[in-house]
Image (spheres, grey):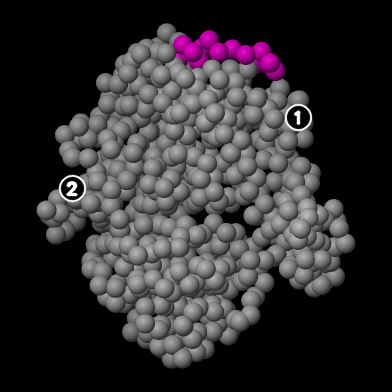
Amino acid sequence: MQRTLGTCYYPEHWPSEIWADDARRMVDAGLTWVRIGEFAWSRIEPQSGKLNWEWLDQAIDVLGQAGLQVVLGTPTATPPKWVLDKHPDMLAVDANGNPRKFGSRRHYCFSNAGYLDECRRIVTLLAERYGQNPFVAAWQTDNEYGCHDTVISYSNAARDAFRHWLRTEFHKPGGNAGDIDALNSAWGNVFWSMEYSDFDDIDLPNLTVTEPNPSHALAFRRFSSDQVVAFNRVQSDILRAHSTAPIAHNYMGRITEFDHYKVGADLDIASWDSYPLGFLEDRVGASPEHQRAYARQGDPDFQAFHHDLYRAVGRDRWWVMEQQPGPVNWAPYNPIPLPGMVRLWTWEAFAHGAEAVCYFRWRQSPFAQEQLHTGMLRPDSVDAPAIVEARQVSAELAAAPDVQPYRAPVALIFDYDADWAWAVQPHGQDLSYFGLIFDTYRALRRAGLSVDILPPDSDTFDDYSMILAPGMMHMSDTQKKALANSSAQVVIGPRSGARDSNMVIPTPMPPALPDLDVTVARVESLRPDMPIPLNGGGAVTGYFEEVEGTATATLQTEAGHAVLMNNDNVYYLAAWLDDPGMDRMVGLICQAAGVRTMSLPEGIRIRDTATERFWFNHSTIPIKTEVGELRPADVVRVSKE
């Protein structure tokens, strides 16, 4: 498959007289794709029922005639003011009971039926008009679900929809009526006299005196995710009825409030918006020293993790819909990328299997909220540095062999439901499922490994030598058996299987793994200044489980407490380990699995494809490697032949 480049363009922001020249310059830069329309509802429909298609017809024609392929976005992330006037109850409500208000974007609640009808109508009109347009080669639904904390809404609409959802979840056998007794039992509502007599008694889990019942809170998070899935499905069904072009959505980094796998099941392509420098300051959770060391390059693993995650969400079809081209406007600090990093980020995405990388945005806006968000052009239309690096990548794509797909030897399971369970009950400050998963992923990458990320419902693992499933708070018996029956070396835990599906401690006690005699007897969360040293190096940090059983203790603390226990190929990890501890654990399991590891220098990362190995230098200094000296922002492709 040919790897391609693109950009994000807003013709409604610029005089129509310059559209043709913009299109020509895009083609000259080697771009194939141009995404438009996702924020243009007020220009398409300035008043209710008064439609203005002419400018969009012209823009699509100009871009298409120039040789570009259009990704047309549905405009539902930015409903105009008249939509809110028509549906004043459509606003999302935060956990403190405050409506989010008009004045930026994503100002809607996924549960509001009136707003959903408006979305259904505008998407239908868009699909009817452009579904057969030869220049519209792909679609994007909405924009960045979950951005700005907009998945979970505590509105009246959400409350009513949640009650209906609960009736369905706890329905009586053989009928449609809800079984409130089943809910009370499953949630343990006898505690603190929280029992309900009717589903209409159930409110949303906010503004309680102290924390709400964790079963209630987890159910509400699952419901909120399902609302996003249903909202997206309405749009994808409409688009598919009028067009054969593939459909994508642009996800974000470290947005876990909804199940991306379930949204992706209704789409053809997963895409995500990659902002390495903004995310380093805003979402990686790195120390000040790490942020300073990678301030102009981005974290060496954060983008790679999401590339691998969205390859799983898209079932091997995925894009970067927005690639950072220079300084952004929204992070705590917004430095200029190191020269060559835009090129490195692009090639990193292709090495992980991306079909396309699109730079955000074509021209920097001189007005509104994103004035300081760099584009490929300056506001005066002069080339910005990003377009120079994009031209270089385009030339390299034309001259080099295509990147071939690759099945990695190592798999890491990522479970959105587990993230919600950890968020409901973290048990310690700053402990999160994403943090545990990311620490595990980083250890694998430090060992020179390429990684596949798998959804939790995977049931066959025959293609992998090593599988890791940390922190999966609830595990079904089917999942446990599938992992136990695998021929791979399998690492489960910590906190895996720690709760049943309703967030209750199960019996038999966790983790209850087949053929592995390990029981978690007691758990503790640790202060950052209370690490527990491992015998031989490394330490337990953050979270530790006291375990019992006859399984072999492969790693222990200096005091002799078991940390990693196994029987044959199945291991239980009873702790969150620091980096040296993670490195030891990965090394032990890889040795047992027969997987070759490397000790990569700080800032160096590799990614294998079927025919090549890519080397990336994320540091600010030249570094000697087995393939020679890599300068800052270097990308080196080495054939495996």
Residue type pointed to by label 2: Arg
Q: How many residues crowd around disc 2 within 10 Å: few (fewer than 14), some, or many (20 or more)?
A: some
- Taking depth in this image into account, of 377 and 449 the one nearest to the observer is 449
**Label 1, on which residue?**
87
- Counting from the top left corner in percent of width and height, residue 263 is at 54, 45
Q: Which mark is residue 637?
A: 2
Horizontal and vertical percent for residue 172?
78, 60
Q: Is residue 614 visible?
A: yes
> Which element carries disc 1, helix, strand or loop?
loop
Magenta stretch in the rendered image: 46-59
Q: Quadrant of the N terminus?
A: top left
- Looking at the image, residue 77 lies above or below residue 333: above
Outermost residue, front side: 174
Q: Residue at x 61, y 71 (%)?
A: 499
Q: Is residue 89 above or below residue 613?
A: above
Answer left or right for 382 relative to 72. left
In the figure, residue 195 lies in which quadrant?
bottom right
Q: Magenta span has 402?
A: no
Give the residue type that dot 1 points to. Answer: His
Res 9 → quadrant: top left
Q: Earlier in the sequence, mark 1 or mark 2?
A: 1
Q: Residue at x 50, y 60 (%)?
A: 457
**Residue found at x 70% / y 41%:** 111
Callout 2: SS: strand
Relative image position of residue 488 (x, y in whole percent)? 35, 71
